[in-house]
Image (spheres, rainbow, N blue to C red):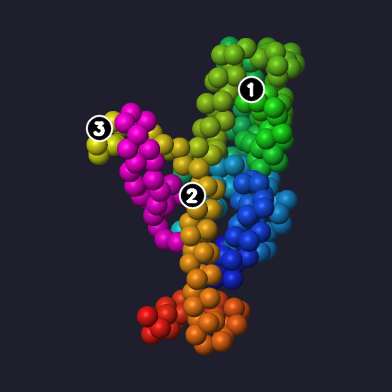
Amino acid sequence: MRSLTASDLLRVWELGLSQHPLDRALTVLQAAEPGESRAGLAALSVGRRDARLLEVYRLSFGHHLEGSAACPACGSRLEFQFPLDRALEETPQTESNWVYHADGYQVHFHPADSFDLAAAAQAPDVGAASRVLLERCVTQASRDGQPVAVHDLPEAVLAGLGERMAECDPQAEMLVNLTCPECKHSWQERLDVDAFLWAQLTVRAKKLLIEVHTLASAYGWGEADILAMNPFRRQAYLELLS
């Protein structure tokens, strides 16, 4: 994996503008891992995919993910930083552990991947999307050795299964602990890794466009030459113009 170059940033941003977030995430990963196939990246579990997206963020933008959130108690907005090194420490479990046992039930499953999320995204509502994910992720279910259909699993078993699936792919849902400086309310905010990465990528891409416009207007250089510059040299020319 490598960091995104200036050319990569603009190309990925341009492609991603018209893409679904699921496709956009794969476009980012392909730019950082050009040797990987899109299908192979889509087959990664959501947690493994998001871990790679965080690595792209770390290599390209720094060791802290920067974001903002609204306090659910008073509505005040606060800025926060999330240390990426800590998030990247968690390791998904191996395939041999992808099984859940409870009350005589034995359920084999695989963590959801991008293909599964894409199928669920076509469902008409949240309930239907959850059923699609279960039907795709549960590979076999039985009770006391007898096969059981996914839709016949009791609610208690499904709830436990959901927790077990989260344990097996911990980076699929990363949470940050926040406390509002205004009202002191504390809560956990879910990190939408793709959204945070895309927001940062968009800011950098628009900044690059301004830099290209400024330098091209002043010196007559082409976009490719400007983007190929070391960012420190590009900044030095911009400072001369200012």
Query: Badge 1: few (under 14), some or many (20 or more) residues near its Cα, within 10 Å?
Result: few
In space, the residues marked 3 and 1 are separated at their CA atoms by 35 Å
- Closest to the observer: 6 or 177? 6
Where does residue 136 sit, x and y in percent of width and height?
A: 71, 30
Whether tag 3 and tag 1 are in contact, CB under 8 A, the answer is no
Which residue is outermost to the bottom? 219
In space, the residues marked 1 and 2 are separated at their CA atoms by 26 Å
Question: Where 25 sits versus 33, above or below?
Answer: above
Where does residue 123 sit, x and y in percent of width and height?
A: 70, 29
Which of the two labelled residues, at mark 1 and mark 2, occupies the earlier sequence position?
A: 1
Q: In which image quadrant can residue 2 be found?
A: bottom right
Q: Which residue, given by chain and number where applicable, does mark 1 sit on?
A: 127
Residues shaded magenta: 61-88
Q: Which mark is residue 196?
A: 2
Q: Secondary structure at mark 2?
A: helix
Question: Where 114 sits versus 232, above or below?
Answer: above
Q: Is residue 230 visible?
A: no
Residue plotted at (25% across, 32% down) = 183
Residue 76: say if magenta. Answer: yes
Query: Badge 2: few (under 14), some or many (20 or more) residues near its Cα, within 10 Å?
Result: some
Where does residue 115 sit, x and y in percent of width and height?
A: 70, 41
Q: Which amino acid does the dot numbered 1 rest on?
A: Gly
Residue plotted at (43% across, 47% down) = 87
Q: Which amino acid does the dot numbered 2 rest on?
A: Phe
Q: Which mark is residue 183?
A: 3
Quadrant where the image shows the N terminus: bottom right
Q: Secondary structure at mark 1?
A: helix
Q: Which amino acid does the dot numbered 3 rest on?
A: Cys
Which of the two labelled residues, at mark 3 and mark 1, occupies the earlier sequence position?
A: 1
Residue plotted at (54% across, 39% down) = 172
Q: Secondary structure at mark 3?
A: loop
Residue 25: say if magenta. Answer: no
